[in-house]
Image (cartoon, rainbow, N blue to C red):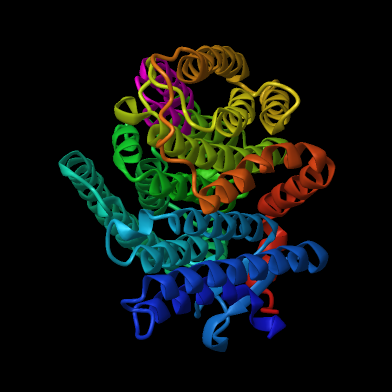
Amino acid sequence: MMQHLTSLPVLLPMLAAIFMLMPPCGKNLRARRIVSVGMGALTTVASVILLLMTREHGTSVYAIGNWSAPFGIVLIADPLSALLVTLTSFLGLVCGLYSCAGDDERGSFFHPLLHFLVLGVNGAFLTGDAFNLFVFFEVLLIASYSLLMHGGDKRNTRAALQYVILNLVGSSVFLIALGILYGTLGTLNMADMAQKVTQLQGDDVYLAKIGGLLLLVVFALKGALLPLHLWLPNTYSTAMPVVAALFAIMTKVGVYSMMRVYTLIFGEEAGELSHMAQNWLWWLAIATIVMGAIGVLASQDLRKMVANLVVVSVGTLVALVAVQTVQSSAAAIYYLVHSTLVSAALFLLADLIARQRGKVADRITAGRPVSQPLLLGGAFLVAAVAVIGMPPLSGFVGKVWILRSTLDTPYGNWFWLVYLVASLAILVSVSKAGSTVFWHQTGKGDSEQERAHPAQVCAVMLLVLCTPLMVIFAGPLSEYALLAAQELHDFTGLLQDVLGGVH
């Protein structure tokens, strides 16, 4: 069983989703909930075990059907992919638990779709093959299309249609890029592509560059990098909050793909194509941070504000990808985990606040008080301090690490200026939102107001408590992030693991 552990984060969500579509779970909501939470917990446990084994024994390469790379499909569990798979599985478990309070009743097949989405995201993180990266992208996107429509109205449908059309165009560009790269390199195994890129000559260099830049367009769309970010605020703010919380990991798939492709395939060892996307990534990242900060300042409701905070986090991560050093990658890994968990927590908190404020919902304006001010106010305060980047929570640790890793870079001065001003804008906006929602009140609370379901409280607390835990265990987490970054930049080691022998 241990040799097949790498496949379990992909296999378990797939089996869970299929089982929930069949009798006796098919029409039994209670059974679907039990299976969903149970299998989510099992997937999380399997992911944690994989993470611990990867840390102890190094990168694991799993050849599907026992066909070795580059001819067969391989799943690669290195410290980075194992960490992100664990993060995805945990987030899926939390969102599945939260939905059991009633959100899963607003449409059909919520729980199977959730597990199909986890399947796609985990597969994208684990795959060592560019074409199968495309396949897993499509799996997660198809699931996300349906989840966006779950319990939706006309406004939700309009945003979902824009999301679908843009991603269909992105998928077409992805296939074109893969076709160009396959025609040039003769392979789509990422490790083999990295080896073949160093041998290109003549016109093949320019063809590979075209293919690589087309991939940049695709990953920028998936990750919501300017100017392809406009779909995200509307899509995330109109989706059901539990769906938006689950989607907090999806933009990270685009960022992760950039880390893999432009560090491994077009990284330091790529000859004429070395760091070919670096300048593009720098300026697009800085512009994305600016636009995200403006969106945060202009937001009139909590969910739109959190959606724009996701845009700022994407710009920050892409800037760190552009630096192309071990320290910047380690900072990006730590910040990626932090920003995903805090964004998801804020989406769920916005939902609970909206349920308890009546017609005002989550709009940032005076309204009736929430019925659980200590619970929601305390959780919001912790999440707000974390997302702003103030001490003593994980956002501050991530911010200091980010600033240190970009200090001596070519565009470091620009990045510091933009990032610190954006942080000030976030401080002002989030503080204003919190004080308005919890202190500026009109009328009195209604004793009949909806109170948070225990499953919702449990899910929110699991996410909110992660940020102080990331500070308490900052030492081991920082060491793991550095290990993951070193493995990411170890060109020779990865080639030996994947092509030198499957284990």
In the image, 252 versus 192, the foreground residue is 252
Q: Nearer the viewer, residue 170 or 395?
A: 395
Question: Could one spot residue 276 in this view of the protein?
Answer: no
For the residue pair 68 and 106, the one nearer the viewer reads as 106
Residue at 52% x, 11% y is 428
Was residue 292 drawn as part of the magenta stretch in this picture? yes
Side (left or right) of 62 relative to 435: right
User: Is residue 231 toward the left or the right of residue 188 in the image?
Assistant: left
In the drawing, does residue 26 fall left or right of residue 337? left
Residue 101 spot, x, y in % from top left: 44, 55
Quarter in which the C terminus is drawn: bottom right
In depth, the one of 334 and 472 nearer the eye is 472
Q: Position of residue 66 (x, y in %)?
A: 57, 87
Identify the residue at image location x=53%, y=54%.
455
Residue 282 screen position, x and y as percent: 50, 28
> Measured along the vertical axis of the image, is residue 330 above or below residue 143?
above
**Residue 466 belongs to magenta span:** no
Q: Position of residue 44 (x, y in %)?
A: 62, 65
User: What is the magenta range?
Assistant: 284-310
Quadrant of residue 303 within the rendered picture = top left
Judge whether 12 appears above or below 237 on screen.
below
